[in-house]
Amino acid sequence: MSALAGKHIILGITGGIAAYKSAVLLRLLIKAGAEVQVVITPNGKQFITPVTLSALSGKPVISEFFTANTGEWHSHVDLGLWADAMVIAPATASSIGKMANGVADNMLITTYLSSKCPVFVAPAMDLDMMAHPSTTRNLELLRSYDNHIIEPAEGELASHLVGKGRMEEPEKIAEVLEAYFACPQPLKGLKAMVTAGPTYERIDPVRFIGNFSTGKMGYAIAESLRRQGADVVLVSGPTALPDPAGIRTVRVESACQMLEACRNEFDSSDIAVWTAAVADYAPAHPADSKIKREKAQFDSIDLVMNPDIAATFGKCRRDGQTLVGFALETDHGPENAARKLKAKNLDIVVLNSLSDPGAGFGTDTNKITIFDHLGHSAVFGLKSKAEVADDIVNYIAEYRNK
Ligand code: CTP
């Protein structure tokens, strides 16, 4: 049976020549057992008739906010909540721009803005429009909203020019949707918390002690946990990264604030992943006003030790919780990782060694070895942080089943 069987799908059609292919996509989704509601923009109707689409879907096509004769109102909010997925194919440059910027001037865009389901976008346009920085920026914005972009293919376009911009074939789009729903979600129903980023410890209002952590690894883990079905809260130190879509993000500055934020989340969490590079020490007496250079006595700063967040919660953990820490080491990696596993009462420790090229702070890649409390370990090659995050989360899911 197809993973699409019984799924509620909104098929959004905008005004591009590729709209004729949407009929094939609709047919494939219906054949796979999905219930499909077509929402078409006014310009979309210039390219394919609602009669064709309603015949194929078995439902009246929605285009306007009201049905002209009866005055019946179509609720974009109800429609957005009804859907398990929304696929916009073709998505023109104009509609992509409206989606990116919240220009809700037709039924399709209002439905998009109201929907809580995953959204798949299959752009279709001429190659120069596709390559324009405005399109690139708008697609980036959609990605940052966690929309799935189904990249257009290269080939001959309606303009007879050859290049990138042709809407992906309906069979491929249906495959992407099918794969999405076929993906198991082993962490559904569980709550996961993740600490991420550095902490800043104030010396005075303009200076701090911190470290080079960018938060990329922790954010990638939070996103992977969410993809696997967990309800995720991310407790983040100062980073330049936006709040990930679908994840409650609590922003903090210092180690003490991070500890307090974690206290609110830990008891109700089934999984805790400590990825934050917490500053080990903080100035003992942070100044309330900026310390002037002339008057400064910066030859030394008195420091106090910060709380160890992982160890604090390791002491008061309850049955059924899975605690995961990191060990970022320059020397004696496996020995230090094993020591931290015990000392912080963790189930799993992820070792990354700063001596491995491509691993550590600021890079987009990482190379890890995982050790667990049951004495097992696994070595992984150099991968993107998103792939490393998936490896860690898969390991957590398997560990919980042991
Ligand atoms: N950690 C934490 N709170 C701290 C320090 C560390 O929660 N104050 C967590 C980190 O998020 C990580 C693990 O503990 O998951 C190990 O962090 P690391 O900096 O490698 O170890 P430290 O305990 O600080 O030990 P050392 O600096 O001696 O290597």
Image: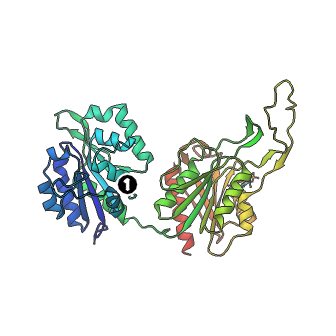
- The quadrant in which the N terminus is found is bottom left
Q: Is residue 102 left or right of residue 385?
A: left
Which one is in front, 380 or 212?
A: 212
Amino acid carrying mark 1 in the image: Ser
Q: Is residue 51 left or right of residue 329?
A: left
Q: Residue at x 28, y 69 (%)?
A: 5
Which one is in front, 36 or 136?
A: 36
Residue 131 point in image, percent of width and height: 32, 33
- Observer able to see residue 390: no
Which one is in front, 52 or 347?
A: 52
Rendering quarter of residue 79: bottom left
Rendering quarter of residue 32: bottom left
Above/below status of 240 relative to 319: above
Q: Is residue 271 left or right of residue 31?
A: right
The residue positioned farthest toward the top in the image shown:
294
Q: Residue at x 70, y 63 (%)?
A: 341
Residue occupied by mark 1: 114
